[in-house]
Image (tube, rainbow, N blue to C red):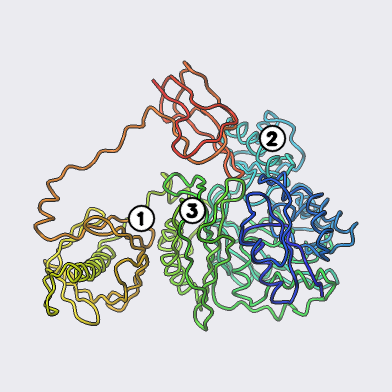
């Protein structure tokens, strides 16, 4: 076995590979840029080598710099993770020439399958059903418009060397095809150093289901079930699960066998993923093959018990697979929620900054529940604008789908992240959405169910009553503590009132609290419910794990005037707990009005101004492009919300802006 391997990546995937290497007794080498000098993967590895400035195109994807690190440390093999150089055939060739093992597929397989245009043609020749499209290279936007019209809208514009949702756009008309082609081309060049673009038919109402394959390149190829990846936003996966709630055994077998046949056709070795679009009638169409470890590989590991990283390392060392297809059994159900550094309340735009609080739920591995968190950050660490916004993958397992979802709900509510915008509330909202719970999902789920964006969750009346009871019980504990400190309690005789008014999300609950040594009984007046609340929460705790009538309720807690800020199940609530007289007076207070920013274009995220599309004095129409902001490798076009005239422009192309910086003003 290898004595030392270098991980040519960063973040959570680098940490993930290091964990398996440690388990196998293999030493590890990390590489890092200026921005990652204090990163977790650097701290975890046995050695670390600095390879350049923060931008990936000056560090992580510069082959010569990575090769120099390999030579310096004497690493015998390299695991590329995903993204960066993971599907770069030139990198694999350089390793081969240097006598260093690539923990991935052969160069030929990368070249054939890593290029989406070539892989489509090979798949067609191998008899794999594919989506209609134009596989040739497209020179300019006008040619893209012409081809799109011939295929028929809607179409998907994709980077040939793309992955992770980068360089992908859906176009429904000529204007969107023209604009999408240029944005996809720019993103592809920036992220992959390859701006080739192709176009294919966009299948409406599709499900995104992928097959995990594993081959040793010595005649043994197996598939390890499928992953459902239909919950996507901007072509970027958010929630994944294994198996799919949609497939039956017959379809799973057919897809798995086609995936293996395709892998064999290109002489594949290592772990890889064959992605399919599946329609409502269970017809499936080949999309692409990812010749690397997928981001969502943990859910496959959880239902099969196979460590994919370990298998990749063993195959790279020349070992044959000990597993046969008959050995692969799907056990239970697994969920994955991707934690992104992005603000769901600002249309999911990237968010950067320092993690002032980062407390994942405790990892658990028991007979009936598993909680796993693959992460590459730590409390106090910095989230950079230079890399992908995903900072962790929270995974849960249960004996069935409903149990896996419930385990995920509790884990998400227990995950504390402060200092940056993040999508945990949105992930919680998905877990409670009726369509998701039923398994009735497509890749259009987010677009259809959240057409106006995400502005938090409004809990139903029953859930609000449970939270109100929890808040009343917690308030009673806090009041007792304050009374003791101030001397208002003498000889354990409480001088804290029992009657309280709890308001949250526009609802008012009048309750009576009766406390004892084991908890509190909160009785809602006017025929409302009675809740028995138990918890070991003490004032100052940021997380409260309670039981309401025996059912769990996890709350993130911040103290606020006359109550708390409570967060649970995707809801972020300002909860007031007042005496009846205080509530009566509070009802007379006027509400504070938000500042008027209707005549300002504010930067919605920290980012770089790529270009300005307008000038001072120009009249713009609703929907017209005003400027383009790049953040975390994605281009975002900011558009006019209404007709107006530009009166002032405060930024120029090349400027780095913070959130809410004023880009331009309108008359």
Question: Looking at the picture, does residue 402 appear above or below residue 128?
Answer: below
Of callouts 1 and 3, the N-terminal one: 3
Q: Which mark is residue 327?
A: none
Q: Residues within 10 Å of mark 1 (few under 14, many from 20)?
A: some
Q: In which quadrant of the rendered view does residue 147 lie?
A: top right
For this rendering, which residue is in front, 627 or 461? 627
Q: Which mark is residue 445?
A: 3
Residue beneath label 2, please? Answer: 147
Q: Position of residue 78 (x, y in %)?
A: 78, 62
Q: In which quadrant of the rendered view does residue 20 lie?
A: bottom right
Q: How far is the residue under mark 1 from the one under mark 3?
A: 16 Å
Tell me whether circle 3 and circle 2 mark residues in contact (CB < 8 Å): no
Of callouts 3 and 2, the N-terminal one: 2
Q: Quadrant of the C terminus?
A: top left
Residue beneath label 1, please? Answer: 457
- Secondary structure of the residue carrying tag 3 is helix
Q: Residues within 10 Å of mark 3 (few under 14, many from 20)?
A: many
Q: Residue placed at 23% from the left, 41% from the top?
A: 592
For this rendering, which residue is in front, 454 or 2? 2
Q: How far is the residue under mark 3 from the one under mark 2?
A: 28 Å
Q: Position of residue 175 (x, y in %)?
A: 58, 30
In-image side of 320 versus 183 (left or right): right
Q: Residue placed at 45% from the left, 64% from the top?
A: 415
Question: Looking at the picture, does residue 37 appear above or below residue 656?
Answer: below
Tell me whether circle 1 and circle 2 mark residues in contact (CB < 8 Å): no
């Amino acid at each position: 076995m290898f004595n030392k391997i270098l991980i040519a990546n960063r973040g959570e995937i680098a940490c993930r590979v290091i964990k398996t290497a440690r388990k196998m007794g293999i030493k590890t080498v990390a590489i890092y840029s200026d921005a990652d000098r204090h990163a977790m993967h650097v701290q975890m590895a046995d050695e670390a080598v600095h390879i350049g400035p923060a931008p990936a195109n000056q560090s992580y994807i510069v082959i010569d710099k990575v090769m120099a690190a390999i030579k310096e440390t004497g690493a015998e093999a390299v695991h590329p993770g995903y993204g960066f150089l993971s599907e770069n055939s030139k990198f694999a060739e350089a390793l081969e020439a240097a006598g260093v093992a690539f923990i991935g597929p052969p160069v030929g397989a990368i070249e054939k399958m890593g290029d989406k245009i070539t892989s489509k043609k090979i798949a067609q020749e191998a008899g794999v059903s594919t989506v209609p499209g134009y596989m040739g290279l497209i020179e300019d936007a006008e040619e893209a418009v012409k081809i799109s019209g011939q295929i028929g809208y809607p179409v998907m514009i994709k980077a040939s060397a793309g992955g992770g949702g980068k360089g992908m756009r859906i176009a429904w008309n000529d204007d969107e095809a023209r604009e999408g082609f240029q944005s996809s081309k720019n993103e592809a060049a920036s992220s992959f150093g390859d701006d080739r673009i192709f176009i294919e038919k966009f299948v409406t109402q599709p499900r995104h289901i992928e097959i995990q394959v594993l081959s040793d390149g010595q005649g043994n190829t197996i598939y390890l079930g499928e992953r459902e990846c239909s919950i996507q936003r901007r072509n970027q996966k958010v929630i994944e699960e294994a198996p799919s709630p949609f497939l039956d055994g017959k379809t799973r077998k057919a897809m798995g066998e086609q995936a293996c046949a395709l892998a064999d056709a290109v002489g594949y070795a290592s772990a890889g993923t064959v992605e399919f679009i599946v329609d409502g009638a269970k017809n499936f169409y080949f999309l692409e093959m990812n010749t690397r470890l997928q981001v969502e590989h943990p859910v496959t590991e959880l239902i099969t018990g196979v460590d994919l990283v370990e298998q990749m390392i063993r195959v790279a060392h020349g070992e044959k697979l000990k597993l046969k297809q008959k050995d692969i059994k799907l056990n239970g159900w697994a969920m994955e929620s991707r934690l992104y550094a992005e603000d769901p309340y600002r249309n999911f735009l990237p968010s950067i900054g320092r993690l002032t609080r980062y407390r994942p739920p405790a990892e658990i591995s028991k007979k009936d529940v598993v909680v796993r968190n693959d992460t590459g950050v730590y409390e106090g660490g910095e989230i950079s604008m230079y890399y992908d916004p995903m900072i962790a993958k929270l995974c849960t397992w249960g004996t069935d789908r409903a149990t896996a979802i419930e385990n995920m709900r509790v884990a998400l509510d227990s995950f504390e992240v402060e200092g940056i915008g993040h999508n945990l509330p949105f992930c919680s909202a998905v877990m409670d959405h009726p369509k998701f719970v039923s398994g009735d999902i497509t890749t259009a789920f987010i677009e259809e169910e959240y057409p106006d964006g995400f502005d938090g969750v409004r809990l139903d009346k029953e859930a609000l009553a449970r939270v109100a009871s929890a808040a009343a019980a917690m308030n009673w504990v806090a009041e007792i503590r304050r009374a003791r400190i101030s001397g208002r309690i003498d000889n354990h005789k409480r001088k804290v009132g029992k009657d309280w008014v709890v308001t949250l999300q526009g609802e008012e609950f009048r309750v009576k609290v009766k406390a004892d040594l084991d908890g509190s009984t909160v009785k809602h007046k006017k025929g409302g419910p009675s809740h028995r609340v138990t918890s070991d929460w003490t004032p100052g705790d940021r997380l409260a794990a309670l039981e309401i009538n025996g059912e769990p309720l996890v709350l993130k807690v911040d103290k606020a005037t006359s109550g708390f800020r409570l967060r649970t199940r995707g809801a972020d609530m300002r909860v007031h707990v007042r005496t009846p007289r205080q509530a009566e007076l509070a009802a007379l207070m006027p509400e504070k009005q938000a500042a008027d920013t209707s005549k300002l274009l504010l930067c919605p995220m920290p980012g770089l101004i790529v270009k300005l599309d307008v000038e001072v004095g120009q009249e713009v129409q609703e929907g017209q492009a005003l400027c383009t902001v790049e953040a975390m490798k994605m281009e975002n076009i900011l558009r006019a919300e209404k007709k107006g005239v530009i009166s002032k422009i405060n930024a120029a192309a090349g400027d780095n802006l913070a959130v809410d910086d004023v880009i331009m003003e309108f008359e």
